[in-house]
Image: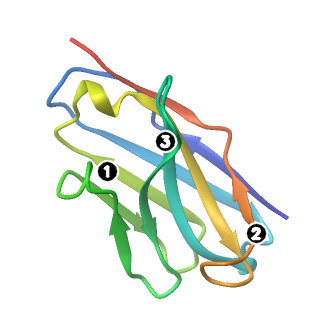
Amino acid sequence: QVQLLESGGGTVQPGGSLTLSCTASGTIFMIKDMGWYRRAPGKQRELVAEIASGGTTRYSDSVEGRFTISRDDAKTWTNLRMNSLQPEDTAVYYCYAVLGTPGRGPRSWGQGTQVTVSS
């Protein structure tokens, strides 16, 4: 079993930056891919960024060029650096880890961290 704990959320003005962190514990050797989703009020869940087991990254079109995902080789943490934040980035951000089989295994989820972009 893998536990994920997010931190780093908060309130920032438009154009500002935040870094979200997600720390993994438990059977971390099972972790393959790691990433971040977000859910804004009244909207569907959206995949924000993912870093695959081999290190390949992908981003949603809405954050491409502004957000950067990273993680350590041991897959004990993943960070999401968010620049040029806009009000539409306001959401609860959830960290996840794919276990066992890259791309297809079950997922563990964090509890979520709120990001609010407002002047």
Q: Amino acid at mark 1?
A: Arg
Mark 2 residue element: loop
The quarter holding residue 77 reads bottom right
Q: Which residue is mark 2?
A: 106
Distance between the Cα atoms at labels 3 and 1? Answer: 14 Å
Distance between the Cα atoms at labels 3 and 2? Answer: 18 Å
Checking the image for residue 81, the label placed there is: 1
What is the x, y in percent for residue 53?
A: 53, 83
Disc 3, disc 2: CB below 8 Å? no
Between disc 3 and disc 2, whose residue precedes? 3
Taking the image as shown, residue 36 lies to the left or right of residue 3, namely: left
Q: Which residue is mark 3?
A: 38
Q: Nearer the viewer, mark 2 or mark 1?
A: 2
What is the x, y in percent for residue 104?
A: 67, 78
Q: Give neighbour class at mark 1: few <14, some 14-19, many 20+ (Cα, 10 Å).
A: some
Q: Amino acid at mark 3?
A: Arg
What is the x, y in percent for residue 105?
A: 72, 76
